[in-house]
Image (cartoon, rainbow, N blue to C red):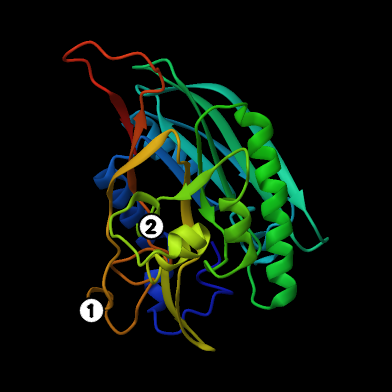
Amino acid sequence: ALGTNNDNFVACPERALDWGVRRPLLLQELAAATPDIICLQEVDHYKFLEAALSPLGYRGLWEPKPDSPCKYVPDNNGPDGCALLWRADRFTLVEEHHHHIERTLSAVQVVLLAVLRHEASGREVCVATTHLKARAGALMSTIRNQQGIDLLNVVAAHADGRPVLLAGDFNAEPSEPVYRTVLQHPALRLASAYSKASHRVEEDDGVAHGDPVAASAQGEPPYTTWKIREEGEQCHTIDYIFYSRSAFSVSALMDFPSGEALGPGRAPSYQYPSDHFSLCAELRLEDSRPEPRPPGRCASERTK
């Protein structure tokens, strides 16, 4: 949202940061993935996205930050916030909830939550997205953890036993307290889609038996964002898709571009419209009924 002003992407050509250049790249990426559910953060062009994705069958919600940094940029497009969209032929909106999580006057973030009914099965899923406070340091890590606690309380209150999908920019590496807070919530029982430990893509050396959260953290990809700013190159994992581990299984994941593919300027660039890479997971919603299924009946539904 602030790419041409305050984000200091010193290795990126200024022209590549223009919304007119980034816009078609973003739409191409979304159209290529054809996700059933989309969660976006730092969205200050929601009206454009809504108009562009509506002909493709999407409906959506948007919640702006109450004190968005975008509002202080000259000639701004308005506040940024979180957006949640879904394919209307696959899901029907049952409930929507818009929340603010506030721990300091300068750290007011939003939670956007929707309960969606899967048309094919009639089952309901609770989907939430958020963008936690950025910046490094012990104080900000503590604030993010407190925001994470508030976030989970909101999700648990509205999930009401439904399967949960929670996606967003947490601005926290797996070593931060909020990562553990999310995975150890007793009611939600979440796992991280991109962690190898969560869906047993690889067997670890037994750490999972002693500390499943540590195993999950070790199994996360090395980066979800890779950029160069004035203070140096930044390559780390801060974005996640969390899911109810008792209700979903991970069928497929979209890979991130390699350092070689990104090139020396990293991201954003003329090829990649954001300094964050898209997390795209195909999740299988498992059949929750205990009785045996008739022969030939599909055991699950897919959403991605």
Between 250 and 273, the one nearer to me in the picture = 250
In which quadrant will I find the C terminus?
top left
In this picture, is 214 found above or below 153?
below
Callout 2: few (<14), some (14-19), or many (20+) C-alpha neighbours within 10 Å?
many
In the image, residue 164 sits, relative to residue 160, either above or below, namely below
- What is the CA distance from the residue labelled 1 to the residue labelled 2? 26 Å
Which badge, 1 or 2, is on the more N-terminal residue? 2
Which amino acid type is marked by label 1? Glu
- Horizontal relation, residue 42 to residue 98: left or right: left
For mark 1, what is the residue?
A: 260
Residue nearest the viewer, comparing 144 with 70: 144
User: Circle 2 sits in a helix, a strand or a loop, which is it?
Assistant: helix
Query: What percent of the width, then of the height, locates residue 177?
Result: 64, 65
Residue ID at (37%, 79%)? 13
* Residue 303 sits above or below residue 41 on the image: above
Residue 197's tag is: 2
Q: Is residue 170 left or right of residue 98?
A: left
Tell me where residue 175 appears, x and y as whole percent. Answer: 55, 70
For label 1, the SS is: helix
Q: Residue 233 falls in which quadrant of the image?
A: bottom left
- Residue 80 visible: no
Q: Is residue 166 visible?
A: yes
Which picture quadrant has residue 288?
top left
Residue 149 coordinates in the image, percent (x, y): 70, 51
